[in-house]
């Protein structure tokens, strides 16, 4: 992701930059409802957002960067929601809650074909959360648990979206927790050994 107009990861320098980025994100959501993601151009996006192309390029290198930045914000919101989680189950429940609150964004990530880019970032983020809960767990085990849990979550959410989000959020949460149970056990044991 571009680090243009950014003080720290994901934090724009001033109110005007944050406002411009919010306009661009909202315009992207609107356009994604009207056309395929891959057909959205910088010209169409800036027109819809009411900003100049030059303004777009001062903030981003590509349209994908808007979504990558939004993903970083989503993770920051997740960290804020959790503060100091006590169990991995609490982490999973909170993560799913935050993801479901941003359903339109998650659908857009899928349509944009950015799931893998977001997944790579998410593995590191999930690993850091698990490490807080289980500081003695070997790094390799921690990474494998994070990848396994995220792949399962991604698969369930992809299926949920594909089916038109008809399954209740409670049922989706129940299924995620059932599938995560073996990961909880590995963490409680301190790893696979």
Image (spheres, rainbow, N blue to C red):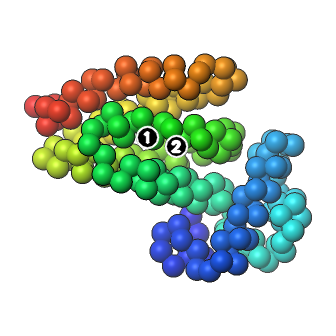
Identify which residue is drawn at 48% across, 36% down: 96
Q: Which mark is residue 19?
A: none
Quick one: which residue is furthest to the left in this view? 193
Q: Judge by depth and name the residue closer to the eye, 190 or 91.
A: 91
The residue nearer to you, when weighing 130 against 91, is 91
Q: Position of residue 141 (x, y in %)?
A: 22, 39
SS at badge 2: helix
The total number of labels drawn is 2
Estimate the x, y position of residue 79 in percent, counting from the top left: 41, 54
Residue at point 20% right, 30% down? 186
Q: Which residue is mark 1?
A: 94
The relative height of residue 76 versus residue 173 in the rendered view (above or below) is: below
Provide the residue designation for mark 2: 98
Would you say the residues marked 1 and 2 are in contact, meaning their CB atoms lie under 8 Å apart? yes
Q: Residue at x 57, y 37 (%)?
A: 100
Residue 138 visible in the current orientation: no
Describe residue 52's horizontal placement relative to residue 178 as left or right.
Answer: right
Q: Quadrant of the N terminus?
A: bottom right
Q: Position of residue 73 (x, y in %)?
A: 54, 58
CA neighbours of label 2 inside 10 A, class few (<14), some (14 to 19), many (20+): some
Say what secondary structure mark 1 lies in: helix
Q: Residues within 10 Å of mark 1 (few under 14, many from 20)?
A: some
The quadrant of the picture occupied by the C terminus is top left
Q: Is residue 35 left or right of residue 99?
A: right
């Amino acid at each position: 992701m571009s680090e243009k107009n950014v003080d720290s990861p994901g934090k724009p320098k001033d109110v005007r930059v944050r406002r411009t980025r919010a306009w661009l994100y909202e315009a992207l959501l609107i356009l994604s409802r009207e056309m395929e993601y891959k057909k959205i151009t910088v010209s169409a996006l800036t027109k819809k957002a009411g900003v100049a192309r030059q303004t777009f390029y001062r903030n981003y290198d590509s349209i994908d960067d808007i979504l990558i930045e939004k993903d970083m914000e989503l993770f920051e919101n997740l960290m804020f929601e959790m503060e100091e989680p006590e169990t991995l189950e609490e982490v999973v429940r909170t993560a799913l809650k935050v993801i479901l609150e941003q359903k339109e964004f998650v659908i857009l990530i899928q349509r944009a074909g950015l799931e893998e880019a977001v997944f790579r970032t998410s593995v590191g983020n999930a690993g850091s959360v698990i490490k807080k809960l289980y500081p003695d767990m070997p790094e390799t085990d921690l990474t494998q648990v994070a990848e396994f849990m995220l792949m399962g979550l991604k698969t369930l959410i992809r299926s949920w979206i594909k089916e038109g989000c008809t399954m209740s959020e409670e049922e989706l949460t129940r299924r995620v927790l059932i599938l995560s149970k073996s990961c909880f056990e590995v963490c409680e044991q301190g790893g696979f050994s």
